[in-house]
Image (cartoon, rainbow, N blue to C red):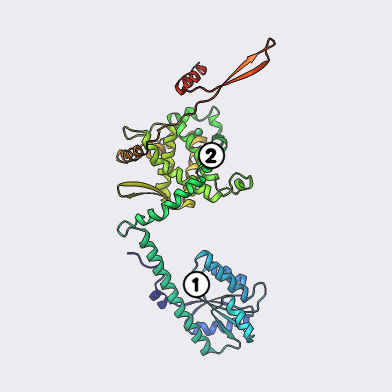
Amino acid sequence: MTEPAVSPSATAQEAWRILLVDDEPTQRLIMARLLKRAGYSVEMAGNGREALTKIAAGDFQLMITDWEMPEMDGIALCRELRSLEGKEGKAYIYTILLTARDAIEHVVTGLQSGADDYLTKPVIEPELMARLSTGKRIVTLERSLRAEREQNRRLSITDPLTSAYNRRYLTEQLPREIERAARYGREADDLLTAMHEVIGHGSGKLSDRLKGGSEPYLKEYFSTLEEARADLMALWNVWDPELKKLGLANDQENVARTMYDSQARVALTQLRRIPRGDTISEDHARDRALIVNYIKDKTGAIEFIRNNGKTYVHVKDYQKMREGAGMLLRELMRIKAEGDYAAAKTLVDQYGVHFDPNLRDEVVARYRQLNLPTYWAGVNTELTADFDDKGNVKTVRIGYPRDAVKQYLAYGQMYRH
Ligand SMILES: [Zn+2]
């Protein structure tokens, strides 16, 4: 069992941390001395902006802020703080607003901006201490609730023994992923292919030593590396804001996630094409295994979940997966540029070649129920031109052959040398 993130007892032993915000240096110092004497640990800021910078860097439980300040006043600070807590899930900071204004509408404005309490100047010491005690009670309660909620969330989606995502995860998360794939799968696929071919294979530079290309250096690993490089260029660049500007991805976040899901899963699904043995030989298949196994191993962003005798592939963290893709891309670029055969061999042999035959058997059995073809091939139309006496094209006849084998053999014949 893991400890909650913040335990109330721990905060009681340490000094409570207060951020004191006031533009008036003398006021600030007097107040700080008073708070320190009462056992608080105090940091100071001269206006709202400065306070937000300190909040971003530190972990405060309490804040006392003046209302009128230059640049950003106490009201704006309270509003900004509450919106940050909402968006970023930062721990709650109990806030007391200080001011000379005591009309009822000022009190209302102050509290509506997100302050928890309101004190008018001049501050009376015992009153301030009593109000801070209230703050401490609220913060302790808030933090223990937060820790408990986090604990519950973890327990509800993970197996208590292995802390792997369990069945509940599968019933809640998987349908969402399927829906996203149905909606964005085609777009994500097309984008991957386009980026693979256009910016993938075309990318990179070679060192001077490799004038004739890196193929003679990388030998039997060249093609796997080249295909992986092309896929990784797509995976890395799919999050680039330029894509949106160019109108190539409307809902970029969803398209990118869909692309990552299917790229991660293909390491599993492609096994159905290898009915025998326990090694991969086709270069595209090696490339995909290399990418998935590398990212899984180096970043933990991808995980394989077992449930009810079935294996599922789950992307735990998309940005981490992107980091992993970037790491591997950088290394493959280097390997290609320098023709580093030994490094290519090590990477591909470790991540791109071997698989668990039991897993393959499971995949093959699951696919058998779907009765889908293992491979798809397109049959092209056949265009035949009729010429006149001068050799100009008169008409073009279009034919729709049905025999794929015949067509592919004919293509093979065309490129024989
Ligand atoms: Zn390719």
Q: Is mark 1 on a helix, strand or loop?
A: loop
Query: Viewer-nearest of labels 1 and 2?
Result: 2
Tag 1: residue type?
Tyr
> Which residue is drawn at the image coordinates 41% and 70% (left, top)?
6
> Which residue is drawn at the image coordinates 40% and 33% (left, top)?
373
Q: Which of 184 and 201 is in front in this view?
A: 184
Q: In this view, does 165 lie above or below 194?
A: below
Real-space Cα distance between discs 1 and 2? 45 Å
Pointers 1 and 2 in contact (CB under 8 A)? Answer: no
Q: Given the current orientation, which residue lies at the most extreme right position?
A: 390
- Would residue 242 be found to the left or right of residue 35 on screen? right
Q: Is residue 109 above or below residue 265?
A: below
- How many numbered marks, from 0 up? 2
Q: What element carries label 2?
A: helix
> In x, y percent, where is residue 273?
38, 33
* Label 2: how many Cα within 10 Å (few below 14, some 14–19, many 20+): few
Q: In this view, does 126 lie above or below 206?
A: below
* Circle 1 residue: 92
* Label 1: how many Cα within 10 Å (few below 14, some 14–19, many 20+): many
> In x, y percent, where is residue 204?
56, 37
* Circle 2 residue: 190
Q: Which of 81 and 410 is in front in this view?
A: 410
> In x, y percent, where is residue 109?
62, 79
- Would residue 286 be found to the left or right of residue 356 on screen? right
> In x, y percent, where is residue 384?
59, 18
Q: Given the current orientation, which residue lies at the most extreme top position?
A: 389
